[in-house]
Amino acid sequence: MHEMSLVEAVFESLLPLCADNGWKRVEKVTLKIGTLRQVIPEALLFCFETAAAGTPLEGAMLDIQEVPIRQKCRHCGLEWGGEIPLGRCTACGSTEVDTISGVELDIESLEVAVDDDEKS
Ligand SMILES: [Zn+2]
């Protein structure tokens, strides 16, 4: 499953972070995911919950922020959003186009639970 490999990549970043900082429980993870990744949020959520079992991320809320596609023409410098036309400049017709956003897979923020011992 496509989503599982994304989740594994996220966990490979998060788990060492939890270990290094002594975080026992993460409450919320916000991910920025470009729409070009073609992630199905429900599938991602399911994979996240499966992978989180038995880790500090178990029970964490997953917030998925989709990042829209933006493209930029190398030829005339035009920037535009949206998928269409993909890979072709709307102004000069050049196909030398860079995708400047929409491929993100970033951990935007984390909310970590305070140590249980410090709660009263
Ligand atoms: Zn152009």
Image (tube, helix red, strand yellow):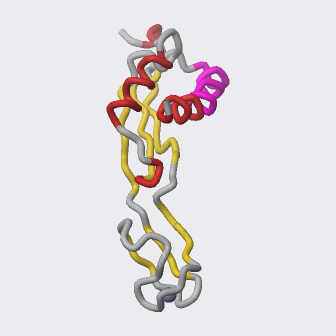
Residue 52 belongs to the span the image colors magenta: no
The residue under the point 48% across, 20% down is: 57
Q: Quadrant of the C terminus?
A: top left
Q: Residue 28 placed where, x, y %?
A: 39, 29
Residue 114 position (above or below residue 84): above
Res 10 → quadrant: top right
Residue 9 position (above or below residue 76): above
The residue under the point 44% across, 41% down is: 31
**Residue nearest the observer in this picture, 60 or 116:** 60
**Residue nearest the observer in this picture, 101 or 90:** 90
Q: Residue 41 placed where, x, y %?
A: 35, 37
**Residue nearest the observer in this picture, 88 or 10:** 88
Residue 107 shown left or right of residue 69 in the figure: right
The residue under the point 67% across, 24% down is: 20
* Dominant SS type (magenta): helix
Q: How many numbered marks are there? A: 0
The residue under the point 52% across, 67% down is: 100
Residue 15 belongs to the span the image colors magenta: yes
Residue 112 position (above or below residue 73): above
Residue 68 shown left or right of residue 100 in the figure: left
Res 60 → quadrant: top left
Q: Residue 30 placed where, x, y %?
A: 41, 39
Q: Residue 113 placed where, x, y %?
A: 43, 21
The residues colored magenta run 11-22
